[in-house]
Image (spheres, rainbow, N blue to C red):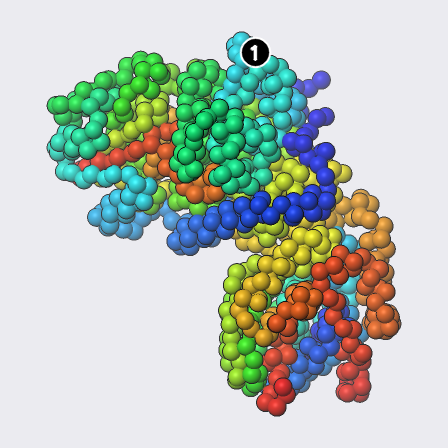
């Protein structure tokens, strides 16, 4: 099987990648600034919603219901979509999905495809497969365009070029678009993207999109966006291919009323994003004449099988957890070695890609809980991180020194007499502390003085052991 | 009230002064404190790092040690959060559901015990220093402490309370996180230290000595002007102490 | 070898097990508004202003005058209209071109589009188009740089659930919700107005007679 999450299988470990990124002060400043801005905006529009918690609860329950009955909802979606003129394909893994896309484009003798931001296609490395087949994929989301033109990697789920500031973006645009002059304002950069892509929107015959939601009841698909590039991609081409993970289904059209409130406020701090496109199959005289849906597994059914961490699949990719995460704030997204970065990436990548590739990601968190607090679908990310750590330990993935240290600590803490003896050792020297690897700690912090008397000794001496 | 003190393993070893202060405050308020000497740990380090069977063993011990206590007071938000958030699920596996269900409501973090259970904000303390407060993530998001610790501090005579900027940001300790991701942890610590120093406070307090050991260790390394003191020690202070 | 479809469905069934109890969904969020009619309209206009949309208000019967006013203010002389846009609402003066089967490049060369809407949401300042004969196919309000939309107060709902449910049978037509002009926050998280969709959106709110 070729389950794949971008290039995460080849990525460096989190601590190694983080160490390098921490030295990039420009990138860190960009990330801090951007996440501070978006956190402030989110807080403002969430605070004005008296029913925010009720919406979160409903969303969580809708997602639970969906996953509990996913097989029947998938079949229901397939039927409704087909009745409306869509063609539904199923892809077990990344290679199978890419082959379906390439096949459809080749069957129309096309060499180009316009794409609206799609995490699943980054997952399967679709662009790579398209290029190998002689097809040019054009990313049309502004941030994706920055990444594609700059030959860079995404560092954020919603704002993939969040690590770049406007002067860096301007530089990329001037070089790659062949512009002699370009203003410095964000408006100028957006204008350059408009001019650069307009001709492609009007020319290219095949469009590719993901989906934020797919409605089982009606066979409808929903794309949430801001720039209008999504509308262009799903409206203007003759052929439209939409690929999404099997977990993106919601049971009913009315369920959208919950998610379309939660997603924009969580993702970009807007009451509503500028555009939502919802379409059902093919509409004569309006939009594409041919519509393909690819339902992608690529590891999702493995996640579904683990009841303890199943709710990872509730994720609606709003990235609020990234923006709230104090770890992400320091390192940016590249440290996670995956298109899915931040707290959600730390739980999603290892589960999709397989634990052997990502044994450091579940530890890339101080378990502060900020992610859980902001999650619009109430994924208990800290709890799942701990669950994945347990799986790593149980499968023998932890370092020997750690396992020994934890075994000794466990033995010691199971008996107050043994704890007392260990405390004596700590007072005599710091060996037990140093043994579990405190050099990293001591590089930046002093250890406290070890008191001459433990609390229990004081109690015994002053209260006579009462 | 007969209050059973669970000191926690690291307070016992590294911060006995915090435990003495808890005893001093509670006795000053007219309560009796007991210390069950067989106690050890809550199992948090093992649980959070993925060592589940060890954590369950320690949980069983905690339940055996405290099941018949009237109330259990703990000067550590993270240990209380461990017990409240994770024991119920672990108990299912260990067949201790009833015991844990009965015990958890009797477990309190020290400051919430004062404000919520005893209904006190003025504990009769005097502490003539400027103080800022680091709210630990567990206090904030698990215990939902809101402004309870601040209410206690503001009632202390002579204390000048200074608000900490970005107080909802994690300090970067996170238990074994500080070891496994030492560089990231240090970067988080730098921001926290900057926030603490920006207040100009002499003392940074909190309800978790683990965070305070981390912040304090950084501050002394940098020869910062502030020092870290557990909130129990401030609340225990009386005129003439300092 | 089984097909991908069968295999994925089998994986799903194995993963969720045989017992699949219905998960309850509590819809305790707001599903209906509480504002008075006038407050609801004010909120809608306030939200539209938030998006830098120009808003005109008029009574039923005054649509043509108001459309003329809006187009004059923007200096628009040649405007696309959907095939079913009511002729009675059109002022004399500007040149209105009915979109029957125009080429996308022809649409790209026009100054803007004038349409009706199916519904609107006050809380979010959203217009909802279901691309009927009075609203036009999707390309019409997408390719041009200017969109003037006429919406009636009896089409306006306070909350998102009310607005979406108002679509009724039209929900399986193509649906576009529009909240302000196209925008991006991809550059340093600063909202920039106008990328690929219309960069200018004006709205005429007509008091339903």
Q: Give coordinates of residue A336: x percent, y percent.
A: 65, 42
Q: Can residue C44 be seen in this view?
A: no
Residue C198 vs residue A175: left or right?
A: left
Q: Which residue is drawn at 16% across and 33% down?
A: C69
Q: Can residue A202 be seen in this view?
A: yes
Secondary structure of residue under mark 1 = helix
Label 1 is found on which chain of the structure?
A
| C94 or A318, nearer to the observer | C94
Quarter the N terminus of chain A occupies: top right
Image quarter for residue C105?
top left
Q: In this view, does C61 lie above or below A286?
A: below
Q: Residue at x 43, y 37 (%)?
A: A184
Pointer 1: what residue?
A106
Q: Give coordinates of residue A203: x percent, y percent.
A: 43, 15
Q: Give coordinates of residue A370: x percent, y percent.
A: 57, 54
Residue A361 vs residue A464: left or right?
A: left
Q: In this view, does A465 lie above or below B196?
A: below
Residue reaching furthest to the front: A180
Residue reaching furthest to the bottom: B240
Q: Which residue is drawn at 64% across and 17% down?
A: A132
| C163 or A345, nearer to the observer | A345
Q: Which residue is drawn at 28% across and 43% down?
A: C49
Q: Is residue A313 above or below residue A439?
A: above
Quarter the C terminus of chain A occupies: bottom right
| B90 or B98, nearer to the observer | B90
Q: In this view, does A423 lie above or below A288?
A: below
Q: Give coordinates of residue C82: x percent, y percent.
A: 26, 21
| A466 or A186, nearer to the observer | A186
């Amino acid at each position: 099987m070729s389950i794949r999450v971008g290039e995460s299988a080849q990525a460096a470990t989190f601590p190694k990648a983080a160490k390098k990124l921490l030295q990039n002060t420009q990138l860190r400043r960009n990330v801090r600034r951007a996440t501070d801005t978006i956190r402030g905006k989110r807080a403002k529009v969430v605070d004005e919603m008296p029913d925010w918690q009720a919406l979160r609860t409903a969303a969580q329950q809708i997602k639970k219901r969906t996953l509990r009955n996913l097989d029947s909802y998938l079949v229901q979606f397939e039927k409704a979509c087909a009745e409306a003129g869509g063609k539904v394909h199923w892809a077990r893994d990344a290679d199978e999905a890419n082959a379906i896309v390439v096949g459809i484009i080749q069957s129309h003798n096309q060499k180009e495809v316009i794409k609206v931001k799609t995490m699943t296609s980054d997952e399967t490395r679709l662009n790579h497969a398209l290029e190998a087949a002689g097809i040019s994929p054009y990313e049309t989301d502004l941030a994706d365009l920055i990444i594609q033109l700059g030959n860079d990697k995404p560092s954020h789920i919603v704002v993939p070029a969040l690590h770049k500031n406007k002067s860096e973006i301007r530089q990329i645009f001037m070089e790659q678009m062949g512009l002699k002059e370009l203003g410095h304002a964000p408006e100028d950069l957006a204008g350059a993207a408009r001019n650069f892509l307009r001709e492609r929107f009007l020319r290219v015959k095949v469009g590719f999109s993901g989906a934020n939601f797919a409605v089982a009841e009606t066979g409808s698909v929903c794309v949430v966006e801001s720039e209008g590039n999504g509308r262009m991609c799903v409206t203007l081409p003759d052929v439209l291919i939409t690929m999404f993970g099997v977990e993106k289904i919601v049971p009913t059209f009315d369920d959208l009323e919950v998610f379309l409130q939660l997603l924009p406020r969580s993702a970009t701090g807007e009451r509503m994003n500028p555009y939502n496109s919802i379409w059902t199959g093919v509409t004569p005289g309006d939009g594409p004449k041919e519509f393909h849906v690819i339902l992608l597994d690529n590891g999702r059914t493995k996640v579904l099988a683990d009841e303890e961490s199943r709710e990872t699949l509730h994720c609606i990719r709003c990235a609020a957890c990234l923006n709230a995460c104090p770890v992400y704030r320091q390192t940016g997204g590249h440290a996670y070695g995956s298109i899915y970065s931040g707290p959600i990436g730390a739980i999603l990548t290892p589960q999709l890609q397989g634990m052997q590739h990502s044994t450091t990601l579940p530890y890339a968190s101080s378990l502060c809980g900020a992610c859980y607090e902001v999650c619009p679908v109430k994924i208990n990310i800290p709890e799942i991180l701990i669950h994945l750590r347990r799986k790593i330990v149980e499968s023998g993935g932890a370092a020997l020194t750690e396992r020994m240290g934890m075994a000794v600590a466990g033995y010691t803490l199971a008996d107050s007499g043994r704890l007392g003896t260990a405390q004596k050792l700590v007072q005599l020297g710091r060996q037990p502390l140093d043994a579990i690897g405190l050099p990293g700690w001591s590089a930046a912090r002093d250890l406290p003085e070890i008191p001459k008397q433990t609390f229990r000794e004081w109690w015994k001496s002053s209260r006579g052991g009462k | 009230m007969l209050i059973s003190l669970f000191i926690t393993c690291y307070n016992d070893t590294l911060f006995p002064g915090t435990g003495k202060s808890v005893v001093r405050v509670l006795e000053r308020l007219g309560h009796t404190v007991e210390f069950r000497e067989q106690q050890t740990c809550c199992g948090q380090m093992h649980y959070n790092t993925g060592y589940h069977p060890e954590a369950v063993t320690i949980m069983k011990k905690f339940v055996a040690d405290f099941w018949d206590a009237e109330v259990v007071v703990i000067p550590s938000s993270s240990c209380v959060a461990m017990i409240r958030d994770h024991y119920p699920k672990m108990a299912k596996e260990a067949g201790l559901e009833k015991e844990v269900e009965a015990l958890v409501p009797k477990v309190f973090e020290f400051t919430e015990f004062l404000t919520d259970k005893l209904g006190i904000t003025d504990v009769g303390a005097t502490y003539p220093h400027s103080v800022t407060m680091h709210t630990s993530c567990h206090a904030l998001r698990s215990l939902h402490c809101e402004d309870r610790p601040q209410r206690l501090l503001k009632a202390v005579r002579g204390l000048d309370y200074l608000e900490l900027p970005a107080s909802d940001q994690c300090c970067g300790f996170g238990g074994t996180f500080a070891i496994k991701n030492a560089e990231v942890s240090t970067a988080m610590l730098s921001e926290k230290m900057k926030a603490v120093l920006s207040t100009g406070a002499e003392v940074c307090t909190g309800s978790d000595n683990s965070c305070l050991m981390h912040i304090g260790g950084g501050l002394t390394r940098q020869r910062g002007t502030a020092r870290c003191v557990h909130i129990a020690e401030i609340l225990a202070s009386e005129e003439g102490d300092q | 070898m089984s097909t991908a479809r069968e295999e994925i469905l089998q994986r799903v069934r194995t993963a969720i097990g045989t017992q699949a109890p219905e998960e309850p969904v509590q819809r305790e969020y707001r599903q209906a508004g509480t504002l008075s009619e006038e407050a609801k309209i004010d909120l809608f206009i306030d939200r539209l202003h938030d998006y830098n949309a120009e808003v005109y208000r008029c009574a039923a019967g005054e649509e043509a005058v108001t459309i003329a006013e809006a187009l004059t203010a923007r200096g628009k002389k040649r405007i696309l209209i959907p095939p079913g846009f009511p002729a009675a609402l059109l002022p004399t003066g500007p040149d209105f071109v009915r979109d029957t089967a125009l080429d996308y490049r022809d649409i790209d060369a026009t100054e803007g589009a004038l349409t009706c809407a199916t519904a609107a949401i006050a809380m979010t300042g959203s217009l909802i188009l279901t691309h009927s004969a009075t609203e036009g196919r999707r390309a019409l309000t997408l390719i041009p740089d200017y969109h003037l939309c006429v919406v009636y107060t009896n089409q306006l709902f306070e909350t998102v659930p009310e607005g979406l449910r108002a679509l009724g049978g039209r929900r399986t037509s193509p649906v576009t919700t529009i909240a302000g002009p196209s925008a991006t926050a991809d550059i340093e998280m600063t909202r920039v107005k106008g990328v690929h969709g219309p960069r200018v959106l004006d709205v005429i709110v007509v008091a339903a007679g």
